[in-house]
Image (spheres, rainbow, N blue to C red):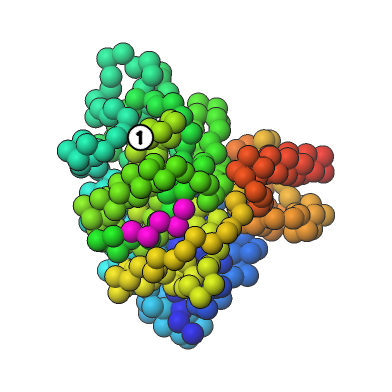
Amino acid sequence: MQTLAVAAISARAMADAAASDGFRVVALDLFGDVDTRRAGSLWLPIGAPGSLRIDGPRVLAALRTLALEGAGGEPVAGWVAGSGFEGEPALLEEGAAVLPLIGTAPAAVRRLRGPAAFFGFLAEQGIAHPEVQLRPPVEPAGWLMKDAHGCGGWHVRRPPWPVDEPPSGERYFQREMPGQPMSATFIANGRDVHVLGFNELSVRRFGARPFVFCGAAGPVPLAAGLARRVTAVARALAVEFELYGLCSLDFMRDGDDFGVLEVNPRPPASMSLYRRPAGAPGLMQAHLRACLHGELPPPSPSHAQEVEGMEIVFARRALELDAAAARRLAAWPGIHDLPDAGQRFDIDDPVCTLSAGGASAAEVRTQLNDGRERLLQSLETSA
């Protein structure tokens, strides 16, 4: 059995996928949730949960330990970087020198997440995207400020721009586009892509942050022409920026039009929405085959899959999880990222993740919204 390390702000989805594919798993993340540790043979912390930021020195220390000592006496084949690493190409580079990185190369991530290179390529190729400027617009109304090194939408701001944050070379300004935020989940091999499906994304306002990622539902149907155009964009980006493995393309859909927002060059949260077709490799096996051997899953006839959804549950007020509440959570249907008893949560901290399935994205969202409200009321009543 091969041992694989997975690292992210929250590594549970990757750990689950790797374990179901037959890997022995080492999980590196901020939370060490019950089900993350259950999926892995070893968990190593790489940051404080409330920070929602990866701690570079702790990542490198953990990778050095794995490179020198392995896990339970077994060598670790390499590591897969997930959420939180897309804006850390220097850390990816340092980590890859310690233990093999299985994914898009750090130099490619650096170029992809550079606003000038990424949006310059889109403009050269005539790929639709909202208007972008690298300097603050003279008339800020209708513009968003973003950080190319951010993730989860926490970095997106409407005017007036914060004056207490230093300027960043990766900051850019993007005209707000109407429509439904969506993503394409795909596997790349640097030359082509295999699109697993398209997803509707859920975002909500948290204080001054108007577009925080809260969940996804998919696969959802797209008109054939639109699906072909989005797939062609994913393929062009995979070639230009040498993308490998599981990735996602974020875009806005407005009727039959769409505008590209960004690419996440790492396994996305939406990977948890996709089941393994009969006879096909699992998602982490497919990720490794694409990265190490350039293999993509073969084209397959579309198979019926109900829409799956996931929703991150954020605390509405400060909470401390006592033993009784932890037991109730453990029995809650469709719960993931399960915290331990005794854990404390500040306002807007992620508490857990809910999942649901149904015939449509609307049905799934209704289930998730209802489940979120009931779960939070249960926790707040007992607090």
Quadrant occupied by the C terminus: top right
- Residue at image coords 50%, 63%: 14
Marks counted in the figure total 1
Residue 149 seen: no
- Nearest to the observer: residue 192 or residue 368: 192
Q: Is residue 195 magenta?
A: yes
Which residue is the extreme one toward the left?
Answer: 124
Circle 1: residue type: Gly
Residue at position x 63%, y 70% in the image: 38
The correct choice, above or below, for 344 with respect to 62 in the image is: above
* Residue under the image location 29 percent in, 35 percent down: 128
Q: Nearer the viewer, residue 356 or 44?
A: 356
Compared across the picture, whether 380 is left or right of 137 comes to right
Placement of 382 over or under 27, stated as above or below: above
Is 159 left or right of 279, judged from the image as shown? left
Residue visible at 53% across and 36% down in the picture:
203
Above or below: residue 126 compared with residue 138: below
Main secondary structure type of the part rendered in magenta: strand
- Please tell me whether mark 1 sits on a helix, a strand or a loop: strand
Q: Position of residue 58 (x, y in %)?
A: 42, 61
According to the picture, the residue beneath numbered tag 1 turns out to be 259
Magenta residue span? 193-197
